[in-house]
Image (cartoon, helix red, strand yellow):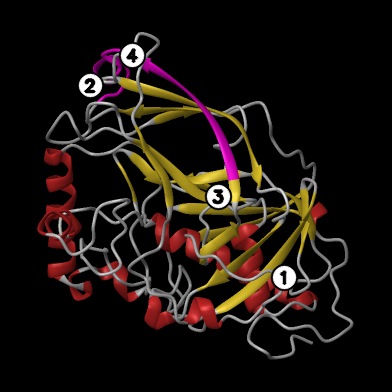
Amino acid sequence: MELRSKKYDDSADDIKSLDFAAPHYLSGPLRVVDSEGVPASPGDLLAVEICNLGPLPGDEWGYTGTFEREHGGGFLTDHFPSARKAIWYFEGIYTHSPQIPGVRFPGLTHPGIVGTAPSAELLNIWNQRERELVEAGHESLNLCHVLHQRPLASLPTSHNCLLGKMQEGTAEWEKIANEAARTIPGRENEGNCDIKNLSRGSKVYLPVFVEGANLSTGDMHFSQGDGEVSFCGAIEMSGFLELKCEIIRGGMKEYLTPVGPTPLHVNPIFEIGPVELRFSEWLVFEGISVDESGKQHFLDASVTYKRAVLNAIEYLSRFGYSKEQVYILLSCCPCEGRISGIVDAHNAVATLAIPTAIFDQVSCNSPNTLSSGHHIC
């Protein structure tokens, strides 16, 4: 998720009043051609290597937040319904926040979004299935009684639509605005998958659906925990990104296996680069498919991961941190989420591993605030 804030302003008012209809500003679309000037074609595979990336020079700071429940909320919005924000300052590869004292960790910097453009056929598939989800309503989904983040999907709308250099208000602009997919979820084209391991040296293989591929990227993160659970939950920053692209002719059919009713129902694959964070000691929290009311769910990985995150929050809040602080920290620190078991009916098992080295001191000796104006100690 992306929102530009102010470097020294830890008020959450900007997040609280965010218009959810315009979340991402992207660089692109980039038309990709080979060395002979021949563009990528539908059915090709685009190998995109992340050569270099980082914060913009002179802009070495970022922020993490969680949305107001009425403006989208987050993974735990039923527990944390109010907007919160923490400002992070970068010192080389490390970061710290005055709103969450006693914590310092290195960041695995990455783009939250990288993806190709959909064809008209694939765009219609997206819009149809997402519209059906919205029309069915949250009462049709049992999981919505446990996970309260809304809306269920962000459908095309002309409100706050970003269409590059197109003239707003024209008939063509209106037509495209009411068809164009919003960038919030990841889809078959990759898009906003928020995978923290797509860092320097990584290579992602993207399906090509239109001539030239129309590659776009953005949503730069200094650091993120697996799941980005608070939604605006990585350390969002202004950044630069250097990419190298290679076209693999006919690569979709050769390397990507469709799982769905059409050849378009594919998902990208990627190679993790050689740059990684190294920690030797971890504290690991488990979760199972039982929600907070004690209700049993059947092999539900979302409920399971929610339990693991809640268990971590409850434990770490014993050491001087507020639960809001821990929630935001787990969203942006380099923690590792895993689905440990998905076959042993009736409980799935998820784990959340937190590197203990990120805690410089687990104490809270002076008043500090977490973007709401209230004291945390």
Q: Nearer the viewer, mark 1 or mark 2?
A: 2
Give the amino acid at mark 4: Gly
Query: How far apart in space, not on screen, are marks 2 and 3 (Cα)?
Result: 28 Å
Of all residues shown, which one is farthest toward the bottom? 374
Give the amino acid at mark 3: Met
- How many callouts does the rendering have? 4
Tell me the crowding category of disc 2: few under 14, some 14 to 19, or many 20 or more residues within 10 angstroms, Cα based: many
Viewer-proximal residue among 96 and 254: 96
> Where is the C terminus found, in terms of image quarters?
bottom right
Q: Which residues are magenta?
A: 240-257
Residue 43 numbered mark, or none: 2
In the rendered image, which residue does mark 4 sit on? 37
Tell me the crowding category of disc 4: few under 14, some 14 to 19, or many 20 or more residues within 10 angstroms, Cα based: few
Give the amino acid at mark 1: Leu
Residue 220 numbered mark, or none: 3
Query: Between disc 1 and disc 2, whose residue precedes?
Result: 2
Is residue 253 rendered magenta in the image?
Answer: yes
Question: Are discs 1 and 2 less than 8 Å apart at CB?
Answer: no
Query: How far apart in space, not on screen, are marks 4 and 1 (Cα)?
Result: 55 Å
